[in-house]
Image: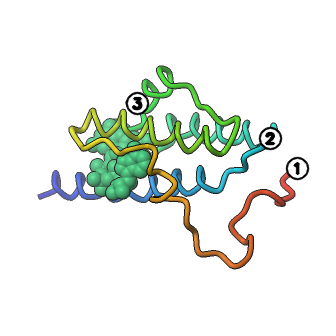
Amino acid sequence: APASAAVHAREELGRSTWTMLHMLAAQYPEQPTKQQQKDVKTLMELMTRIYPCKMCADHFKEVLKAHPVQADSGFELAQWMCQVHNVVNRSLNKPLFPCQRVDARWGALNCDEDACSLEDRSIK
Ligand code: FAD
């Protein structure tokens, strides 16, 4: 049925997006530049406008209002991401994730050397 195909698409999109967001947070530097902090805030704001599930985007806008982005360090961003994901989980009656385990779940990326690291990237 079209309804269940739409639900499937929304769930797949959600899983992929959370994967990207948690992995991004796990690789975010402990001492981010001003630009990196700004970029994260912009990314989250854009999610409230062009995330391709309008219902999710509208809901996320409210979540962001109640839980402003915390991106002063890698630890802060990973914990904040976990908290806002838990707000969404709660609204969908999904189990809450223990945020002390966020690094075990999302921290490991198999990249050569520091190919995944943001630390030395020259974004100006
Ligand atoms: P997901 O919630 O997609 O999580 C994927 C994996 O992340 C889990 O298997 C688990 O290992 C891990 N995980 C779970 N919770 C956490 C956490 N707190 N911290 C770290 N890791 C965690 N769907 C709707 O129906 N309505 C909405 O309003 C809605 N809003 C959304 C807003 C955003 C910004 C996003 C990205 C998604 C939204 N979704 C919404 C989709 C929804 O959150 C799920 O992605 C989707 O239902 C699939 O759920 P899932 O059970 O596969 O696990």
| Label 3: which secondary element | helix
Q: Earlier in the sequence, mark 3 or mark 2?
A: 2
Tell me the crowding category of disc 2: few under 14, some 14 to 19, or many 20 or more residues within 10 angstroms, Cα based: few
Please tell me which residue is depicted at 50% across the width and 25% down the height of the picture.
67
Residue occupying image coordinates x 50% and y 59%: 106
Question: Which of the 4 image quadrants contains residue 9?
Answer: bottom left
User: Is 15 placed above or below 115 here?
Assistant: above
* Front residue (pair 7, 103): 103
Q: Is residue 45 left or right of residue 30?
A: left
Mark 3, residue position: 58
Where in the figure is residue 85, as x and y percent of width and height? 41, 41
Give the CA separation, mark 1 to mark 2.
8 Å
In the picture, the disc for residue 73 is none
Q: Tell me, yes or no, if residue 49 can be seen here.
A: yes
| Label ID, residue 35 | 2
How far is disc 1 from disc 3 in space, using C-alphas? 31 Å
Mark 2 belongs to which amino acid? Gln
**Alpha carbon of mark 3 to alpha carbon of mark 2: how far?**
26 Å
**Quick one: label 3, few (<14), some, or many (20+) residues within 10 Å?**
some
> Which label was assigned to residue 124?
1
Q: Residue at x 50, y 21 (%)?
A: 65
Inspect the image, locate mark 3, and give the three-letter code of the amino acid beneath it. Answer: Asp
Q: Amino acid at mark 1?
A: Lys
Residue closer to the observer: 54 or 73: 73
Q: Is mark 3 within 8 Å of ligand 1?
A: yes
Residue 117: where, in percent of width, then height? Answer: 72, 63
Depth check, mark 1 against mark 3: the one in front is 1
Q: Using a 10 Å C-alpha cutoff, classify the residue at mark 1 as few (fewer than 14 neighbours), some (14 to 19) or many (20 or more).
A: few
